[in-house]
Image (cartoon, grey):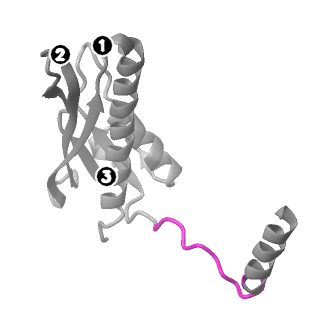
Amino acid sequence: MKRRVFLLALTLALPFSGCGFQLRGASPLSFKSVYVEAPVTSYQRNVIAERMRTLLKAAGVTVAGSPNEAEVILKLGARKQTKTILALTGAGQVAEYRLELSLTYQVHTPAGKERLPETEIKFIRDLTYDPSQYTAKSAEEGFLFDHMDEEAAQQIMRHLRRITP
């Protein structure tokens, strides 16, 4: 059975092996340097700003140390994270929470010319809750917020790729 699947896959892939087919890959960014401006509070680091710096460096863009050294400035707004009760059980205990993450960002040049208008992104996830599994549900909540942070950074990168020279 495994041999048949392998032969079928090989047969289907064989026509593409010599035709020059290649995945498109990510489109390049239209700027060579960027300064990431993000609010930092005394009790929390800005995880989205850190992730953006990593993604920009991986894309071959220089992350400048000051706004004057960069072609464009990526200004991230405050990251707002909320947790609200979505549903209760018949006994009045929490059965489900709604987790929300929102963030605004914009891109402009050091001279103030707008390259991307202020944009808000928002992510919503629902989390079932069981008080007998407090540790597991707390870890799941942290994972969901981490995943939303990653999605926010990826979405901002996709928007940055749309900026034309």
| N-term-proximal mark, 3 vs 2 | 2
**What segment carries the magenta color?**
16-27
Answer few, some or many: residues within 10 Å of disc 3's Cα (few below 14, many 20 plus, some between 14 and 19).
Answer: many
Which residue corresponds to the image point at 35% horizontal and 18% vertical from the top-left? 138
**Residue to which mark 2 is pinned:** 93
Residue 151 appearing in the image: yes
Q: Nearer the viewer, residue 134 or 154?
A: 134
* Image point (40%, 13%), residue name: 135
Q: Which residue is mark 1?
A: 131
The amino acid at mark 3 is Ile
Residue 158 in picture, x, y percent from top left:
35, 59
Going by the image, does 111 lie left or right of 127? left
* SS type, badge 1: helix
Residue beneath disc 3: 156
The residue depicted at 64 percent of the width and 76 percent of the height is 22
Residues at circles 3 and 2 in contact by the CB criterion of under 8 Å: no
Q: Are marks 1 and 3 in contact (CB under 8 Å)?
A: no
**Secondary structure type for disc 2:** loop
Q: Is residue 19 magenta?
A: yes
Kind of residue at disc 1: Pro
Residue 69 in view here: no
The amino acid on which the numbered mark 2 sits, given as a three-letter code, is Gln
Secondary structure type for disc 3:
helix
| Marks 1,2: beta carbons within 8 A | yes
